[in-house]
Amino acid sequence: MSTIFVLFDFFYLLDLYILRTFSYFVKRLDFLQFIRYKYLMFKSEESKKIYQAIRFCGSLTKRETAKRCGFSLTKTTLLIEEMLENGSLTSFSGKSNGGRIPQLFKIKSGSSYSVGIDIGTKFRRAIIVDSNDKIASAKEWDSNFKKPDTLTPDNLVKRIREMVKHIGIEESKIKAYGISITGIVEEKEGICYSLRNVPNWKMLPIRDKIMELTNIPYISVIDSSRAMAISEQRYGGMRDIKDFILLNIGFGLGLGIIINGKLISCERGTTGEIGHMHLRPSTELCVCGNVGCLEATASGWATLKKCQEGIKSGVETIINSQNSPEELTLTDIISAANQGDRFVCRILDKMAKDIAIALGSVINLFNPEKVILSGGLTRALGNLITNTIVREVKSAVIPWIQKSINIETSKLDKWDAALGAATIALDRAIEEL
Ligand SMILES: [Zn+2]
């Protein structure tokens, strides 16, 4: 049996040498860029696996790469040498722990870029990320609820082209677009089913629209909570955690579920819509068209609505004197909560308790190693809501897993969804190359 493996390895290495010679001529002929990508950057699934392992970890030694990919050190060395030669990897000296200085490998910067666009409720954000996952440019603008028609695929691409021009890179270096949407999204076909306050995004085939405008074939559309989960896994504290759940608490609610290191995606496109769970009978209308969804009673939107109703009915609150109910913003409410306003704190406490019950059901379903609380409202309110969620979730979790519940608050910043979208778009582009 071992002879078979030795022969297999021999022919595999021979094959690599032949491909390497072929690559040399292709490179010299300066063939079509696509061919260069396919045969020089990833001429085998093995080289793609090495590229992705190094990209995932930021940097690795040859030995670490071999272990992570399950290849022999000889094969890994040969493949890494090829990628150094074709310019997709670069090497540098690491820090010594007393012995030899380790040689590390990382993805070479500047060869290709990915765009991440985060269509949030209050803000829209766009970033350009280089192949080394470093942000080269970032822009944020207000959603302007009064002018929803300005959010069009043409305007988004126009903004990206301005950013590309500003940082002085060739547009041909943009290889993928990732679009994260805080709405209901069908990811497989890249359709936005609904985006609150933006009627022209209802059933919008955003992936095809951006593809038409850019001629880039690798466009990924993803729900923002799922994009945030990817960011936590790649750039946050979840790199070594196999099973975790991210709960996004903002204007709406959403989940990103990572099981066995992979983002859970359903064939039918939408996944993790915790905001549309029904906890108890309610007549509140949800953005999805149903009545009684969690998001309609316990979310940023629901809090805003409850505060407006409270002010109209004359409750005592410090936000009373600042704004008329119609002009009230979530920022005003967050400010009042942070000043200890009792009316606002009561609403937020109820919201946190309801979210905890829903989260408890999710923990019962998946029993994850960790739960990450994230999103704009979590970042703005911190302990004001997270303490309640952590305390109350236990009552909704089956007793024998209560002790092992591990809930943390995200340490990533507001760019997490855009970064996750850009990352997953490049991942999928690499997969298809
Ligand atoms: Zn709903």
Image (cartoon, helix red, strand yellow):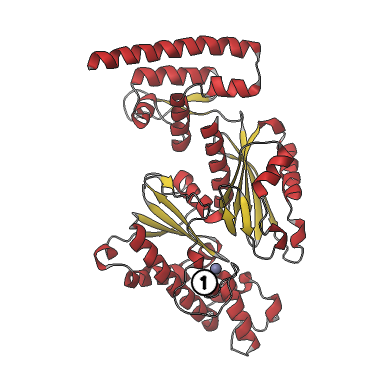
Residue farthest along the bottom direction in this orientation = 314
Q: Is mark 1 within 8 Å of ligand 1?
A: yes
In the picture, measured across the screen, residue 205 lies left or right of residue 262, that is: right
* Front residue (pair 243, 131): 243
Element type where label 1 sits in the image: loop
User: From the viewer's perspective, is residue 117 above or below residue 404?
Assistant: above
Quarter of the rendering containing residue 299: bottom right
Residue 328 at x, y percent in the picture:
67, 75
Whether residue 76 appears in this view of the structure is: yes
| Quarter of image, ligand 1 | bottom right
User: From the viewer's perspective, is residue 265 above or below residue 98?
Assistant: below
* Front residue (pair 331, 279): 279
Number of numbered tags placed on the structure image: 1
Residue 397 at x, y percent in the picture:
32, 67
Q: Which residue is mark 1?
A: 293
Residue 215 at x, y percent in the picture:
70, 36
Q: Residue at left 71%, top 63%?
A: 199
* Quadrant location, the C terminus: top right
* Quadrant location, the N terminus: top left
Residue 391 at x, y percent in the picture:
36, 71
Q: Residue at left 58%, top 80%?
A: 306
User: From the viewer's perspective, is residue 393 above or below residue 419?
Assistant: below
Quarter of the rendering containing residue 426: top right
* Front residue (pair 21, 132): 21
Q: Amino acid at mark 1?
A: Cys
Residue farthest along the front direction in this orientation = 268
Q: Residue at left 34%, top 20%?
A: 73
Q: Assess disc 1: are there few (<14), some (14-19) or many (≥20) residues with their C-alpha within 10 Å of its C-alpha.
A: many
